[in-house]
Image (cartoon, rainbow, N blue to C red):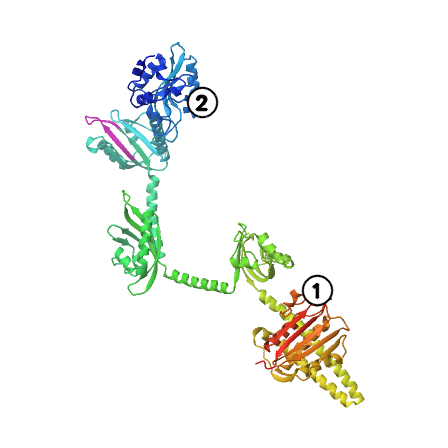
Amino acid sequence: MSIAYKQYLQGGGEMGALTRAFNWSDTLIGSPQNWSQSLLTTVSILLNSRFPMFLWWGEELIQFYNDAYRPSLGKEGKHPAALGQRGADCWQEIWPVIYPLIAQVMAGGESSWSENQLIPIYRNGELEDVYWTFSYSRVNDESGKPGGVLVICNETTKQVTSFNELKQAKMELDFAIEAAELGTWDLDPVTNTFIGNERLKSWFGISADAEIALSKATEVISEDDRDAVLKAIAEAMQPSSGGHYDIEYTIINPLMPSPRLVRAKGKALFDADGVVYRFSGTMEDITSERSNQLELAESNQRLEMALDAAMLGSYDLDVRSGKMNSTPQFKTNFGKEPEETFDLEDLMKSILPAYRSTVREIIARCVREQNVYVADYPICWPDGSIHWIRAHGKPEYDAKGRIDRIIGVAEDITGDVTIRKELERVYEQARLSKQAAQMGTFDMDLENETMEWDERCRTLFGISHNDKVIYERDFLEGLHPEDNERIRAAIDRAFNKTVSDGDYDVEYRTIGQEDQKLRWVKAKGKVYFSPSGLPIRFIGSVLDITEQKLDELRKNDFIGMVSHELKTPLTTIKAYTQVGRLLAESLDHEKLSKTLERTERQIRKMTTMINGFLNVSRFESGKIQLNYETFDIDKLIIETVSDLNLFGTSHHINYRASGPALLQGDRDKIASVLSNLIGNAIKYSPAMSVITITCIPGSEAIEISVSDNGPGIKVSDQEKLFERYYRVEDKRMPTISGFGIGLYLSAEIVRWHNGTIGVKSTPGDGATFYFSLPIQPF
């Protein structure tokens, strides 16, 4: 083909230029100079047509389209990529719809025609519903066979959309008329007959004829209103009236028991000569509306009475002028006389200065957001007294949306504020008391199956998480196993209204879930029941009483220890008394005198011991009193050993005397330290073994030690021996009675003498307890 092919591609606007510039050699149809005459002619017609046209050509249905078709592809979509593209690649979203039409034409079938066909296409960045009226026609090639399909089309989306909108508007109008329960009418001014819908005919008691004479309809209008209605109709049909018709009147339908008040509105239409050619409108039943208006007036009157009774003052503020109409009660609430003028400026001046900007902002925000405002603020009355006002207001706007007025009410809440502040004070006092007492609180909503613990309550159960509290997991599993069943029973009883009034008052132990710490707590609560007797809420508090419980246990232990320790001197006194009786019978006065002396010594020891036990709390509080005297520690040791040997002992007590060794201190309390250390050596060493006591005087201090041949003490126990209530637990040793307080008291006595005490021991090789006392402790 010659270069004459270019003349077929002349013109065509934007698409002509794009078609000439396109590299057709990359497509199956090849370069334009090799195109068939049929293709060139068709493309020429397409490009120069002002009617939307589209062409698919060849086996791959390569695409051509013109400027008239271009807008249908949208601003962001298939253009310009659609030019020269394969049809199947371009129209993937609608290919199942259009390809059968193409195939039918390409196979030799008749041309197709579709009108207002919905074929969604992707354009403008989205898939749009597009309506088309189009025809698919075959274009033959040089051999007379189908070479392509020419689409002559027109997008009818706007027409279809307008038709649908009109149809929808008609439906909405009909629906609105029906929903508003309106009657409709259309009067023919020439024949003076009209047609109406079924509702209007039923109101007038007219049969469902196609046309009704106007005179027949006016017969049921109340005689008091009939002339006014006819006059209004006649005036509306005069051009000077503008055709407007609006009147209210009463219908007295003989078939209806009660009169019906209606409002008729209409419009007359005139031709160029001023002759009315149509008069139509609507009719509304306003019987209930008028009745409601009367009821509303009565309600307003009752409302005003209620407002007065509640001491609520109402106001109506003109925002633009600042003028305010208000009731006498409103003025009274601001300390004004009912006859005084009271405008916005007066109101703002009465508000305490610190609150004025806040009130203005609250009102401004309600105006912006178009909602009701509520503001509490203090005011100063003319007499200087301070009152609190609670004001409610609702903004009203004009036709342009500008704020026009604010209407609302205001009340004097001074009493409520006073009570609230007192409640806040009491609440804060309770909160501080709760905080000071480290009390936890809980709240079980049994209806919604939720349980709330505060942080303190969680601590008492040894948990640190802030997750939802679960009754079974966090509470029941946190109880001490020995208390679990008892507390379950107490809760079940509190939840049973037939056997309790909902009170809950228990003490129990908890085992911390995370820290495994044992705590004693006291819990008090109250269960609230529904009218049917079902428990619906359980609230209460929990107090840590661990120290209190431990004090009770220590007291009981102390009493038991006192009882146990006093047995020894009492037994000794009893023995001395028996010996004294025998000596008295034998008249051995010398021995009797020594026995009585030893008895007196034991009485003194028992008195000292009792005082020591009763003053154990003084050690803990730092109020111990020492009775200082100068005494010989050597002699004190000899006396202590002599008393032990007097009645026999299962051990050999060997004292390595050092000779006289004087020091200053509380002789009786030092004696109790010696007795305790020797007593422990006897308890924890084998019978018939040797217990060695040494006393080594120094220039500034004297050191006394007590050694035994017992099982020895582990290093881990040595560090805790002098702690209160600590006892060594060793499976190799028999159980030995005691309360773990002897060494604690001994250590405290030595400490108060500014001395030191300790132990040296190797497991399996006995133990040596020692203490050192300064000669001059001051």
Mark closest to the chain's N terminus, 1 or 2: 2
**Residue 151 percent across, percent down from the top left:** 36, 18
Identify residue for label 2: 96
Numbered tag placed on residue 730 in the rendering = 1
Q: CA distance from mark 1 to mark 2?
A: 92 Å
In the image, taking residue 93 as reference, residue 693 lies left or right, namely: right
Q: Main secondary structure of the magenta part?
A: strand
Between 668 and 483, the residue placed more toward the observer is: 668
Position of the C terminus, as image quadrant, is bottom right
Q: Is residue 620 above or below residue 168?
A: below
Q: Nearer the viewer, residue 707 or 436?
A: 707
Q: Is residue 276 magenta?
A: yes
Q: At 29% across and 55% down in the image, what residue appears?
A: 327
Instruction: Point out residue 50 in the picture as x, y percentages from the top left corner.
Output: 29, 20
Q: Secondary structure at mark 2?
A: helix
Is residue 453 left or right of 129 when viewed as pictured? right
| Camera-nearest label, 1 or 2 | 1
Q: Residues within 10 Å of mark 2 (few under 14, many from 20)?
A: few
| Residue 346 in sight in this render | yes
Q: Which residues are magenta?
A: 264-278
Q: Nearer the viewer, residue 683 or 579?
A: 683
Q: Is residue 620 above or below residue 368?
A: below
Q: The disc labelled 1 sits on which kind of residue?
A: Asp
| Residue 539: percent from left, percent from top | 53, 57
Quarter of the image where the N terminus is located: top left
Label 1 secondary element? loop
| Depth check, front residue: 683 or 367 | 683
On the rendered structure, is 553 left or right of 236? right
Residue 39 included in the magenta stretch of the image: no
How many other residues sit within 10 Å of disc 1, few (<14), some (14-19) or many (≥20)? few
Q: Amino acid at mark 2?
A: Pro
Where residue 73 sits, quadrant-wise, is: top left
